[in-house]
Image: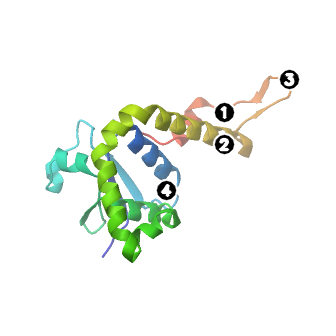
């Protein structure tokens, strides 16, 4: 059973999904995750034997061996690939597995409502993450600014944009 690379299907119109994907893209150092936006014009759900409604109902992923997984199992596998297995490990434990899966399904059913009411929060968190990464890049020698406010060496905006995850 080959799981990785794992192809994650996500909805870029969902602010919560954008936040999660941004976090995973940053931590995808081992290149174990691939990302496919289900709202892209060229996305064809029938290629996977599913409908767009199936993809919108809950997060789905395709394993390297072609198997499709969905729901919390997708979240567990994605977090494992990104080095965050500790975050979701309890959700796989015997007595906690079923409640975690049920809670995920409730979240998935209500993500559009949550996004409408709290999307601004998730979008601001993504912006903050991007800004922190850009600042860290500059701290690591990609640019420096002197104390008199004049830039001695500047960070080209193309570099920063190419380092931030694409959506």
Q: Distance of mark 1 from mark 3, alpha carbons?
A: 17 Å
Which of the marked residues, 2 or 4, is nearer the chain's N terminus?
Answer: 4
Specify the label residue 148 is tagged with. Answer: 3
Q: Earlier in the sequence, mark 1 or mark 3?
A: 3
Q: SS for tag 2?
A: helix
Is residue 40 shown above or below 48?
A: above
Question: How would you rate the neighbour count of disc 1 (Cα within 10 Å): few for under 14, some for 14-19, many for 20 or more?
Answer: some
- Number of residues whose C-alpha sits closer than 10 Å to that of mark 4, classed few (under 14), some (14–19) or many (20 or more): some
On screen, residue 56 versus residue 132, left or right, reads left
Whole-angstrom CA distance, mark 2 to mark 4, is 17 Å
Q: Are marks 1 and 3 in contact (CB under 8 Å)?
A: no
Q: Secondary structure at mark 4?
A: loop
Report the residue at 33% width, 43% height from top.
111
Q: Quadrant of residue 81?
A: bottom left
Label of residue 155 in the image: 1
> In what quadrant of the picture does the C terminus appear?
top left
């Amino acid at each position: 059973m080959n799981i990785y690379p794992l192809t994650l299907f996500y909805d870029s119109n969902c602010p919560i999904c954008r936040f999660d994907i941004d976090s995973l893209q940053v931590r995808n150092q081992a290149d174990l995750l691939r990302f496919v936006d289900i709202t892209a014009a060229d996305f064809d759900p029938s290629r996977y034997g599913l409908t767009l409604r199936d993809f919108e109902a809950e997060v789905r992923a395709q394993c390297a061996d072609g198997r499709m997984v969905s729901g919390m199992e997708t979240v567990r596998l994605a977090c494992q690939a990104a080095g965050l297995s500790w975050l979701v490990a309890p959700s796989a434990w015997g007595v906690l597995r079923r409640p975690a899966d049920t809670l995920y399904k409730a979240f998935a059913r209500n993500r559009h409502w949550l996004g409408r009411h709290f999307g601004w929060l998730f979008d601001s968190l993504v912006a903050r993450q991007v800004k922190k990464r850009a600042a860290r890049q500059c701290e690591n020698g990609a640019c420096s600014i002197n104390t008199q406010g004049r830039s001695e060496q500047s960070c080209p905006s193309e570099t920063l944009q190419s380092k931030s995850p694409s959506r």
